[in-house]
Image (cartoon, helix red, strand yellow):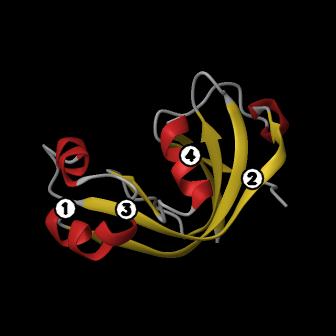
Amino acid sequence: MCTILLSINPEHVNNIFSGKKLYEFRKVVCKRNVEKILIYSTSPVKKVTGEAYVEKILYDKPEKVWKKTKQAAGIDKEFFDQYYANSTKAVAFQLKKIKQYKNPKDLEEYGIKCPPQSFIYVENVN
């Protein structure tokens, strides 16, 4: 079990914290078994603003993943289709125990110098 940090657009971060978005989508599957996600809100926020645990990870053809996630995707079908336009596989992290930090944290607190393009494994996280 491991923790990863995901770079996420502030609009999507807000939808995660409001409960509208219960899935986070990626194109690349992690090689390790992910238990927890640290949520890094990209520019203009540029802070780790919260965390979530992973209920399960869906990995399948984009159309099958959409069918299973559309009710709580927090994005519309057009956005989903554009994101996976040239992909044969889609990854969706189903989020649970979502927690927004009262005091957002800097990446440096996790020993990270710059935000990852997609994700980064994070060691020694409480």
Q: Nearer the viewer, mark 1 or mark 3?
A: 3
Q: Position of residue 21 (x, y in %)?
A: 47, 60
Graded by Cα atoms within 10 Å as few (under 14), some (14 to 19) or many (20 or more), the crowding at tag 1 reads: many
Q: Residue at x 20, y 54 (%)?
A: 77
Report the amino acid beneath label 3: Ala
The residue labelled by disc 2 is: 123
What whole-number distance in Å separates the C-alpha atoms at marks 4 and 1? 22 Å
Dividing the image into 4 quarters, which one contains the N terminus?
Answer: bottom right
The residue labelled by disc 3 is: 73
Report the amino acid beneath label 1: Pro
The residue labelled by disc 1 is: 62
Q: Position of residue 10 (x, y in %)?
A: 55, 36
What whole-number distance in Å separates the C-alpha atoms at marks 1 and 2? 30 Å
Where disc 4 sits, the SS reads helix
Q: How many marks?
A: 4
Q: Residue at x 57, y 46 (%)?
A: 14
In the drawing, what numbered circle is on residue 13? 4
Where disc 1 sits, the SS reads helix
Where disc 2 sits, the SS reads loop
Q: Earlier in the sequence, mark 1 or mark 3?
A: 1
- Between 74 and 112, the one nearer to me in the picture: 74
